[in-house]
Image: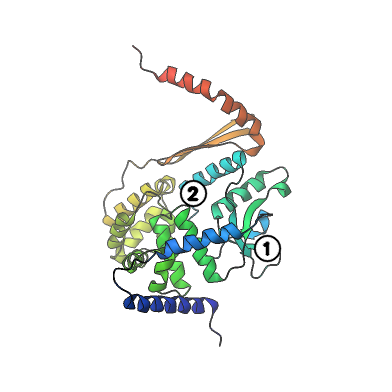
Amino acid sequence: MKKSILRRMAEEAENRADVSEAEDADKPVSRRHSSPVISNVGKALVHLGEDTIVSLDPAKVERSPYRDRFDNDEEAEAELEALKASIASEGQKIPVLVRPHPTMRDHYQLVYGHRRLNAIKSMMAEAERPETVKIKAYVRDLTDRQLIEEQSVENGIRENLTWIEQAMWAVQLKDAGFSHRAICPILGLSEAAVSHLFRVTSVVPSDIIFAIGRAKAVGRPKWTAFADLLKDESKIGAVREVLQTSEFRKADGVGRIALAVSAASGAPALPSVKPSETVDFSLAGRLFGRMKSSTSGTTVTIPKAEDAFARWLAGRMPELMREYEHQTAPSN
C-alpha cells in the first residue's frame, strides 16, 4: 500500500531535521545559523516577486484544508467588519495566495489570506452586482507541505496567531503526521516551546478551547494555569456548564477564560465581565451602519450601499468632534 502524502511529507521533514542536526554537529560552534523562519520569509519574498497578480471569482476560492485561525468569536467578527470597511474604502492592498484546487476544476484552494477572503466574500454577498466583486491573488502550484510552510510564513510576517491558535495549529500539523521536531521549523519555535503547546492541548478538551475562542489578549501563562486545573478531569463538567450560560456567550476572550478558570477552581464567577454590545443605526427600516463594542474596542461599519452616507459622515466628522469636545469639556 502506498504511503499517504502527509505521511511522506512528515518523514521528509524528519529526515531533513536529522540531516541538519548531523551537519550542525560537524560545524564550528562559533558559526551562526539563520533561523528557519527567516529563511522561509526570504524564499516567500522571492516567490512573490516572481508571481503575477490575477483577479479571481471569490466564489471559486475554497479555504485552506488547514485551519490556523479561529472565527467563532466577537473579536474575529469585529476585525472582519473593520477589514471589510477598509477594503471597501481603499481596495484590497495585499493579494492572497492560492493554488489550483487539487480536485475541483477551475477552482482554487487558499494558502493564506483567509480573513481577506472572508471579507471579500461577505462584500460579494451584500453587493448589488456580485459578479463584479473580485479578489486579487497570486496563483502558484504547491504541494501540501509547501502550502503549510507558506501558510506558516504568512502568520509570522503578517499577523501572529494568538497563543492558543498556534497551539491548535500545532495539533493539526501533528494529526497530519508531523513529528515535534518537524513542527519546530514550521512554527519557528524550539522543541521546548512546541512541547508546551501540546501540554495544554492534551489536557484542555478542544470543544472548550473553541468555545473560549482565540482569546487575543490571553497568553501561555493563563492557558497553562487553566490546563493545570483541568488535570482533575472531574472539573471539566463544571467548565462545560459555564459554556452554556449567556454571560459566557456575551463575554470576550479574556472574560470567557476568566469564567472558565473560575468554574474549574470552584470560585464564584467574576461579576466584572463586560458583555459585547451591538447597536444598529437605522431609520425607517434602512440600515446606515452598525457599531460593535467589546473590551477590546469599538468598531463602526457602514454597508457598501451607503457609501454616500459614509462620505457625508466623514465630511461632518470634524464638526461632530468639536461638538463632542465642547459638550464634554469641564465647565470653569
In the picture of the structure, the residue carrying the numbered disc 2 is: 76
Q: Is residue 64 left or right of residue 183?
A: right
Instruction: Examine the rendered structure and indicate whether residue 186 appears above or below residue 22.
Output: above
Q: Is residue 194 left or right of residue 307?
A: left
Instruction: Examine the rendered structure and indicate whether residue 251 appears above or below residue 20.
Output: above
- Seen at 31% across and 58% down, the residue is 226
**Quadrant where the image shows the C terminus:** top left
Structural distance between the alpha carbons of marks 2 and 1: 26 Å
Q: Is residue 179 left or right of residue 140?
A: left
**Dot 2: few (<14), some (14–19), or many (≥20) neighbours within 10 Å?**
some
User: Circle 1 — which element?
Assistant: loop
Front-most of residues 79 and 86:
86
Amino acid, disc 2: Ala
From where the camera sits, is residue 67 visible? no
- Seen at 64% across and 57% down, the residue is 52
Circle on res. 107: 1
Mark 2 or mark 1, whichever is nearer to me? 1
List x then y, in percent, for residue 266.
27, 54
User: Circle 2 — which element?
Assistant: helix
Instruction: Examine the rendered structure and indicate whether residue 306 appears above or below residue 66.
Output: above
- Seen at 62% across and 49% down, the residue is 120
List x then y, in percent, for residue 50.
60, 60
Ranked by sequence position, the earlier of labels 2 and 1 is 2
List x then y, in percent, for residue 17.
40, 75
